[in-house]
Amino acid sequence: MAGVLRVSRPNARFQQWEALLRNRNKRQRAGEFLVQGVRAISLAVERGWPVRALVYDAERPLSRWAAEMLERAGGERVAMAPELLRELSGKEQEVPELVAVVALPDDDLARIPVGPSFLGVVFDRPTGPGNIGTMVRSLDAFGGAGLIVTGHAADPYDPKAVRASTGSLLAVPVVRVRSHGEVLDWVRRERAAGRPLTVVGTDEDGTADIAEVDLTGPALLVIGNETAGLSAGWRQGCDTMARIPIGGAASSLNAASAATVALYEAVRQRGPRP
């Protein structure tokens, strides 16, 4: 195959990509992250993400899917020794067929479209990248428009988040924002443009049951940190605070589970999707 880079030992290029698995700062400086799996890589290509490189097993015949991705994706083609590709996957046993090196998107709230049926989620200061990925997956499943991650938080492009999203991170915009104030300023601008966003926080001591809160209009659901819940700034900035009634011995829901319940309730209130 013409124009192919061959990597048979852990050279500088391999080390650069391997660092993307474990080092957030290096992901940020390089402006790229790693994507694995048929669905995730297919979505990256279909949705026009800038694929900087596609890395494949130098010793395995290409499947039809892998050959198609190499043809369509653009970027660099890299044939890598299987033992190195296994390390690049972050897995001990399985050698993936492809690993994609994909450019990080801009953290711009304009990437999240706001329309009459808008449904979005804010995750305030999450500590677990897996929870971010799971939340993105739920947003995708329920037709959400995007996820906003605020404050000092885990990285949505951590391999654990990317894997937990099962590809949905490539289908749903995720935007990192430094503070709740920037998001509330964005909400005010949207309202001034005639899009009446309602900001609904979730908390076990919320004033209303989630089923009693009107979620039929454009809604931004706010989910708190896994341990501390919502920040004081978000509590003040929300239009209403809703609770999800639970029973049993559990003291609370996992953050991603709470988001899933709230998203389902919003979709239930809005009726069947066309």
Image: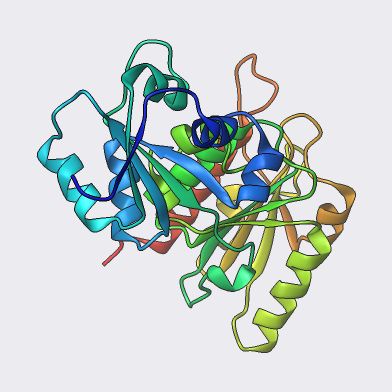
Image check: 222 left or right of 157? Answer: right
Residue drawn at point x = 42 percent, y = 40 percent = 35
Q: Residue 68's spot in the image, x, y percent?
A: 16, 49
Inspect this view and state whether residue 189 appears: yes
Residue drawn at point x = 45 percent, y = 33 percent = 163
Which residue occupies the extreme top position in the image?
A: 93
Determine which quarter of the picture holds residue 153. top right
Q: Residue 75's spot in the image, x, y percent?
A: 36, 55
Residue drawn at point x = 21 percent, y = 23 percent = 59
Q: Is residue 267 above or below residue 161?
A: below
Question: Of 6 and 272, which appears nearest the observer?
Answer: 6
Quarter of the image where the C terminus is located: bottom left
Q: Residue 214's spot in the image, x, y percent?
A: 57, 63
Which residue occupies the extreme bottom position in the image?
A: 193
Determine which quarter of the picture holds residue 240. bottom right
Quarter of the image where the N terminus is located: top left
Inspect this view and state whether residue 209 appears: no
Which residue occupies the extreme right position in the image?
A: 232
Image check: 9 left or right of 68? Answer: right
Question: Of 47 and 235, which appears nearest the observer?
Answer: 47
